[in-house]
Image (cartoon, rainbow, N blue to C red):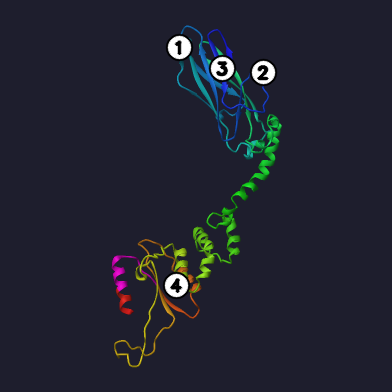
Amino acid sequence: MRSSSTLSVNLTPMQTPDSARSQGSIPQLLLRPGEPSELVVQVRNTGSEPMQVSLQVEGNFPQDWCWVGMEGSEILPHQTMDAVLYFRVPADFFEAAEALRDRPHLNINYQGRICVHASEIETAEFQLFLRPRSLYLDFLPAIYREIDFVGRFLKIFEETFEPAVQSLDALWAYLDPLTAPKALLPFLSHWVAWSAESQMSLDQQRRLIRNAMQIYRWRGTRRGLRFYLHLATGLPLDEHLAEEAKHISIFELYQRGFVLGTTHLTEDAILGGGRPFHFCVKLRPDPDFPIDEALVRRVIEQEKPAFCTYDFWIEPRSQTHDDAFSSTIATTL
């Protein structure tokens, strides 16, 4: 606290260091990278006349770390005005590449001074102690936490080992293709013997790798082919709809052919030309929904039994097409 005949200044730090040693009566403020810290300034007018005041902050710390908050500039006689010095250090202070540029060591202790300008000038000094937050200090007895060097020394080991600890805590996210880093996807795809499609987007590859075992289990079936096409194209499965109303329709055309005693010529008899083990795939996307036809054909060729043949076409989804398609299937069957 500094005072003169008509003006007194008192500084109160909101965060004080536990380990920094006090030097006389100079207030000390603890700073953490990326966290706000405050120093309250109380200016009292002990005179009998109103006083116009302004505050100025000086020090060997970067000026962009600090800004002053004031509610007014006039102090009535025998009244006190409160102001706040807000401090915020960049979160990457200790990790920034320029931290040691043009200097032999990193400065973590700073000196500051606040000047109160009125009819006279009154100053008050303060100290800033910039320290990283260390989790390992919580495991030490209180007597060791009071030693400043211990906290800074433990922070070296914490920065080395903590990333590995955090990776173990979130190991499930590294093993899930939906959340794993991009660099880990080739390993996960090899883990399930899945060949990545370079033409697919990253999100599509993630979904396919995650569901690879399910695709293997249903390979060669209508259900498996529809599920694969759903993941590759993004079209819905529509499990609650009839086959002819789905976005991905897969159907077979069954015909009895020539059966003695039950066949009627020119009506239901087929003499040759039948296509056994043949099926049809029809995609019915909404308007403006993109479909990679080459990709869809590769999926069908990969998933169908080798002896099967198929027809494939894409038709935009509309009510008119829905009615026409339903009528065609009903007539054929």
Task: Specify whether residue 320 is painted magenta.
Answer: yes
Q: Mark 1 or mark 4, which is nearer to you?
A: 4
Of the numbered discs 1 and 3, the one sitting upstream in the chain is 3
The residue that mark 1 highlights is 76
Indicate the position of residue 332 as horizontal and vertical percent values.
33, 79
Please name the residue shown 43% across and 77% down the image. 310
Please report the bounds of the magenta region as a residue range: 313-326
Comes first in the chain, label 2 or label 3: 3
> How far is disc 3 from disc 4 in space, using C-alphas?
80 Å
Residue type at mark 4: give it.
Arg
Q: Quadrant of the C terminus?
A: bottom left
Q: Is residue 282 left or right of residue 27?
A: left
| Relative side of 130 to 244, left or right | right
Q: Which residue is mark 3?
A: 10
Q: Find disc 4 in the rendering and name its residue.
A: 222
Residue pointed to by mark 2: 24
Q: Label 4: how many residues lie within 10 Å, few (<14), some (14-19) or many (20+)?
A: some
Depth check, front residue: 316 or 234 = 234
